[in-house]
Image (cartoon, grey):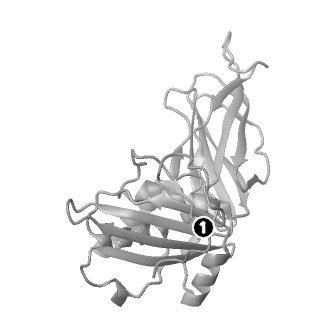
Amino acid sequence: TGYDAESQRRLDDTRLKRVLQLTGFSDPVYAEAYVTVHQYDIVLDVTVLNRTAHTMQNLNLELATMGDLKLVERPQNHTLAPRTSKHIRANIKVSSTETGVIFGNIVYETTAPGAATTGGDGRNVVVLNDIHIDIMDYIHPASCADAAFRNMWAEFEWENKVAVNTSMTDVRQYLNHIVKSTNMRCLTPHLALEGECGFLAANLYAKSVFGEDALVNVSVERSPTDGKLSGYIRIRSKTQGIALSLGDKITLKQRGSDTPSESGTAGAPAPAGSDSAPVVATAAAATTPANDEAEE
């Protein structure tokens, strides 16, 4: 049926988004990875293709991680005949909600006579594109009472403050976009958000698969002269990783695109109890004392 065909198309599109090209088309070895996330585990199914007319020996996928990621086991060596491919699987453990990075090389020896080597030990090295693990795979919408939200807001140590920077002109549309982009739940009742007063304040909440809490306060207003939106999005969490990763995600998504805005990215989060903290990138990030409360 038409419904089944549309559902299958969306499923295929979702799967294609998880296929990442690791090397260039001009490299002697072409590689791409299909990334599967299972809460505490990440599985990389890497397809490696020998594009040359010579056999590649001792081909090895060397991976390293940044963040709270750990490679479970080192993939074994393989021999690739000319124009043939091989599927290599790598398992990575995840221990916290943080945007991690997987990087590495493909190292091999070739039977080509007089072939030049890129490594100092007679081996050839092809550098892989980085794989960035999305924090949205570990965050799910959740609910909590207003009192619990306020208590966590006062207790949590880390805050990231991101300036509103968008081409949108409607405050409700902007809030809905942030909720969808961060995979959070808006705790502020819909009745409190109704009306056309030109400003809006709302609290968002989510929980990670590791039991970590993420709090967000959106405070935005529309200029009566040019209609542009301004304000701040404040993120608080018990760990630095969530505050930083959510700030990066909001900065990336708040313009409604998948590319970073030209105005800069969110800076590093600082302890929410500090009176001041360095701004890393631009004015898009700042800190505020922990004793001020979230907007209602």
Give the camera-side residue of 252 and 124: 252
Could you tell me which residue is drawn at 63 percent across and 83 percent down? 151
- As helix, strand or loop, the secondary structure at mark 1 comes to loop
x and y, in percent, of residue 55 in the image? 67, 25
Q: Quadrant of the C terminus?
A: bottom left
Which residue is the site of mark 1? 289
Q: Is residue 146 above or below residue 66?
A: below
Residue in front for this viewpoint, 212 or 152: 152
Give the image quarter of residue 115. top right
In the image, is 179 to the left or to the right of 271? Answer: left
- Give how far across and how far down residue 256 sits, in percent: 35, 58
Q: Which residue occupies the foreground of this view, 215 or 290?
A: 290
Q: Amino acid at mark 1?
A: Pro
Locate residue 174 relative to residue 246 in the image: left or right: left
Mark count = 1
The residue drawn where x is 68% and y is 11% is 113
Question: Which residue is depicted at the point 69% across and 17% down?
Answer: 117
Horizontal side, residue 3 vs residue 253: left or right: left
Residue at point 61%, 36% (across, down): 128
Task: Give coordinates of residue 195: x percent, y percent.
Answer: 26, 83
